[in-house]
Image (cartoon, rainbow, N blue to C red):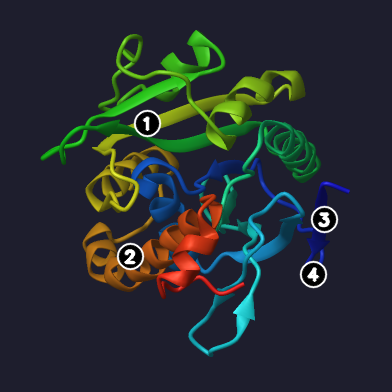
Amino acid sequence: MTWTVTQIGKVPKLKDPVLLEGLPGIGNVGKVAVDFLVEETKAVKLYEFTSYSFPHSVFVNEKNLVELPTIALYYKKFRKGKHDLVFLVGDIQPIDEVSCYAFCEMLLELCKELGCKQVIALGGIGLQQIPKKPNVYITGSSKSHVDQFKKGLNLSTKLYGIVGPIVGVTGVLLGLAPRYRLKAVGLLVETFGHPMYLGVKGAKELLAVMKKKLGLKINLKKMVADIEELEKEVLRKTKELSDVSKKDLNDRNKSGLSYIG
C-alpha cells in the first residue's frame, strides 16, 4: 500500500468544518501558519499518515530518539462560531506525482466523511528578495467562491503571470476538490524563495487573513515570540530531508557531514 492511515481516538462530530492545509513548501509559510494554529488552539490529533514513498530517513528528536517523518490531521471544536476546523500538518509532502494524487484523494474522502465542505490551502510565492510587506493572493476552484471568500479582505486575485504551476498538495487539493463537491481556495503569500528561508512575515499575513475570515481568537504578536523554537525545528528537518533526497549521499558521508545511514 502507498499510504498507511492510523486513527487516533474517536471520530468527532464537527460543525461545518473547514480544512486548513499547511505542509512544507516555499518559505514554509503554510506550515508555519497552520502549525501555530494547531498549537494555539490545542487541536486534537485524529489521523497520522505514513508512506513508503517518504525519504528513507528518520529524525533524531529532543529526547535523542528516532521518529519517522509523518503527516497528520488534527481537529478543533469551538463552542462559538460558524465552523470547526480541521488542520493538515506534517514534516514533508508526498515526493512524487502518483503518491501526491493518491494522498489528496484519500484526504478529500476523509474530509467529506468529517463533514467538510470547504478547503483552504496555504502556500508561498517565491521572490528573489525578502518582501517588506508580503502581499496575499487568492485563487480557487470557482470564481464565485473566490469572490465570496475575499469579501472584506485585502486579497489580490491577479495571479496570472505572477505565479507558475502550484505544485504539490496545495495545488492538487485545489484541483481535485470540485470532484468531491468541496469549495476550495488557495491563499498564496509572497516570501523569499530560498529553500532554507522561513517566511515568518508571510505566515503572519496568512494568519491575519484566517483570523478575520474565521473569527479566530489568536495573538499574532505571540506568534512572533513563539516562532523562534518552531523556526529551529522546521529548518533542521528541512535541511535534513533536503540532504537525504540528494544523490551524492556517499560523498557527503565521506566528508564527515551529518548523514548517517
Is tag 3's residue or tag 1's residue first in the polypeptide sequence? Answer: 3
Examine the rendering and report whether any part of residue 49 can be seen. Answer: yes
For the residues labelled 2 and 1, the Cα–Cα distance comes to 20 Å
Location of mark 2 (residue): 231
Q: Amino acid at mark 1?
A: Leu
Tell which of 249 and 95 is nearer to you: 249
Q: Position of residue 80 (x, y in %)?
A: 52, 54
Mark 3 and mark 2 residues within 8 Å of each other at the beta carbon: no
Q: Amino acid at mark 2?
A: Glu
Is tag 3's residue or tag 4's residue first in the polypeptide sequence? Answer: 3
For the residues labelled 2 and 4, the Cα–Cα distance comes to 30 Å
Is tag 2's residue or tag 4's residue first in the polypeptide sequence? Answer: 4
Location of mark 3 (residue): 4
Q: Judge depth for marks 4 and 1 and give the one in front.
A: 1
Is the residue marked by circle 3 packed among few (<14), some (14-19), or many (20+) residues within 10 Å?
few
Task: Answer left or right for 185 relative to 136.
Answer: right
Mark 2 and mark 4 residues within 8 Å of each other at the beta carbon: no
Give residue 188's mark.
1
Location of mark 4 (residue): 9
Q: Position of residue 201 (x, y in %)?
A: 22, 48
> SS for tag 2?
helix
For the residues labelled 4 and 1, the Cα–Cα distance comes to 33 Å
Mark 4 and mark 1 residues within 8 Å of each other at the beta carbon: no
Q: Amino acid at mark 4?
A: Gly
Mark 3 and mark 1 residues within 8 Å of each other at the beta carbon: no
Is tag 4's residue or tag 1's residue first in the polypeptide sequence? Answer: 4
Is the residue marked by circle 2 packed among few (<14), some (14-19), or many (20+) residues within 10 Å?
some
Q: Residue at x 38, y 41 (%)?
A: 26
- Residue 217, by quadrant, is bottom left
* Residue lying farthest to the left in this orientation: 132
Q: Position of residue 120 (x, y in %)?
A: 52, 35
Mark 3 and mark 4 residues within 8 Å of each other at the beta carbon: no
